[in-house]
Image (cartoon, grey):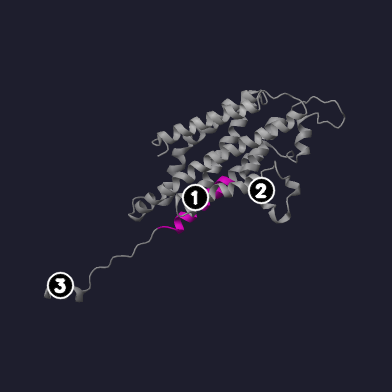
Amino acid sequence: QAFRDGPTNKVRARMSVASAIIFGSVFWRMGKTQTSIQDRMGLLQVAAINTAMAALTKTVGVFPKERAIVDRERAKGSYALGPYLSSKLLAEIPIGAAFPLIFGSILYPMAKLHPTISRFAKFCGIVTVESFAASAMGLTVGAIAPTTEAAMALGPSLMTVFIVFGGYYVNPDNTPVIFRWIPKASLIRWAFQGLCINEFKGLQFEHQHSYDVQTGEQALERFSLGGIRIADTLAAQGRILMFWYWLTYLLLKKNKPRYQQLLPPSEEDQSKQQTE
């Protein structure tokens, strides 16, 4: 299905290119001034949001329709739920990874982010894992929503909550206690934090005053984004991804269509038919 849906994939590819060019033009060739710190964090937050929303909207727009077909085939006993989900996820890995890689390959040099091959590779890896996690979330939304329209309304609304607690708009240390679990479950937060660590570590900024931020490590600490490794953020995204896959499996299994079992005619019915 992922490869057969040519028109949709072409649109997604064009949107990935267009988004990268637009963001790259806005944040063109960022320098090392004090104001560039805010610009870099803004760009990384935008990159995380764009990647997640693109993957989410594609999935919630397609999966509810696909689910109706799958339900009918499962009712016929054509295949089990586990093999279907496994094959679907494996088949979508190449095409799902292509779009964030296209986006990152254009945006990274245009914005002049940390100019090393290893940092670029980590950038692409982070947004790719985030894209998979957002798609997994879209599967869960598609499994819950009764129609495509409902899924398209529910998915972005849920993602908006994760964006608010994504580490840029609300400092995790200032999050109310009752909402402390949301940043931990936010794929936006972990992607943004991983991108920031990848970008800021090792950077030296121009400074004129003693209170200016001089290093990337200081910038990370000021925004409460330091203290962990990129591997930790990827592991957190992996846990979120597996949680959404697991929840999707449970929902599809629970909502399996059930039909009344046909019983053979009784002897009384058979005798009536013979009499008639």
Three-letter amino acid code of the residue under disc 2: Lys
Q: How crowded is mark 2: few (under 14 residues within 10 Å), some or many (20 or more)?
A: some
Three-letter amino acid code of the residue under disc 1: Ala
Most extreme residue toward the left, as rendered?
275
Residue pointed to by mark 3: 273
Quadrant position of the C terminus in the picture:
bottom left
Coordinates of residue 206 in the picture (x, y in percent): 80, 24
Q: Distance between the residues labelled 2 and 1?
A: 24 Å
Q: State whether residue 83 appears in this view.
A: no
| Dots 2, 1 in contact, CB < 8 A | no
On screen, residue 233 versus residue 97, left or right, reads: right
Say which residue appears at 70% left-offset and 52% top-offset.
Answer: 180
Three-letter amino acid code of the residue under disc 3: Gln
Say which residue appears at 41% left-offset and 57% top-offset.
Answer: 256
| Dots 1, 3 in contact, CB < 8 A | no
Coordinates of residue 97 in the picture (x, y in percent): 51, 34
Which quarter of the figure has residue 116? top right
Quick one: label 2 or label 1, which is nearer the N terminus?
Answer: 1
Nearest the camera: 260 or 162? 162
Range of magenta residues = 240-256
Coordinates of residue 212 in the picture (x, y in percent): 83, 30
Disc number at residue 134? Answer: none
Q: Is the magenta stretch mostly helix, strand or loop?
A: helix
Q: Judge whether residue 169 is colored magenta.
A: no
Q: How crowded is mark 1: few (under 14 residues within 10 Å), some or many (20 or more)?
A: many
Residue pointed to by mark 1: 151
Which quarter of the figure has residue 258? bottom left
Disc 3 is placed on an element classified as: helix
Disc number at residue 184? Answer: 2
